[in-house]
Amino acid sequence: GIRKTPIVWQEVFNLNLTIPPDTIIDVWKGFDKYTIQNATQKNFRVILSGCWYLDHLKDTWQTYYDCDPRNFTGNRDLMIGGHASMWGEHVDASNFISRVWPRASAAAERLWTGDVSHGPLQTISKRIHNFRCRMVLLGFAAGPTGPGVCPKEVPYLTYNQISLSSEPALLVNDMNVRKEAME
């Protein structure tokens, strides 16, 4: 049969409800070290999402990158990951891409690389900016990472330009031209 692992929000754990021992606790209320420490002390695996709510408009990619999910006292091996979330209160089809990208990539890099406290912020800053520029060149309305422009800034493709193209090869060719302009 298919093996399923339950994931519950932290309230279920904090209310001391009976949950299976293989349950994963999703800590979504900020970086709640108290819950993380208690859950790992009781040998529950934990994922963190509280640091990476993409609908929090005041947060920048730096805010997401600065959150280190392993910065707690307890069994760090039980911190198994995290996820970025975008709720719909401040987003619709017109601004979804610019709200998510490139900020979600900062959370992804933090989760992928783990302890990066020894690396300079300038390294990630350049990577995030270059990633944003690649997305722009491919026609995605990725949000800015700070002051400055991409080396070969191009106008964004509009939804109508993309959807009205009856020749998919034209769009792919246009993207290849934009990619070559970046190199």
Image (cartoon, rainbow, N blue to C red):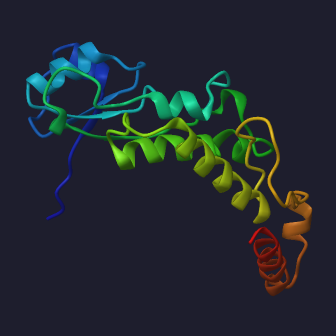
Task: Identify the residue shown where x is 42% and y is 41%.
Answer: 110
When the figure is inspected, residue 130 is found, relative to residue 46, above or below; the finding is below
Above-or-below relation of 51 to 123: above
Q: Position of residue 66 (x, y in %)?
A: 47, 29
Of residue 96 and residue 78, the one placed in the foreground of this image is 78
**Which residue lies at the image location 45% right of the left edge and 47% below the top edge?**
109
Viewer can see residue 178: yes
Q: Quadrant of the C terminus?
A: bottom right
- Quadrant assignment, res 62: top right
Q: Is residue 47 left or right of residue 60?
A: left
x then y, percent, for residue 43: 9, 31
Which of 25 and 134 lies nearest the eye of the viewer? Answer: 134
Residue 60: % across, % down? 63, 30
At x 75%, y 41%, the residue is 144
Quarter the N terminus occupies: bottom left
Q: Does residue 52 show up?
A: no
In this image, 108 relative to 5: left or right?
right
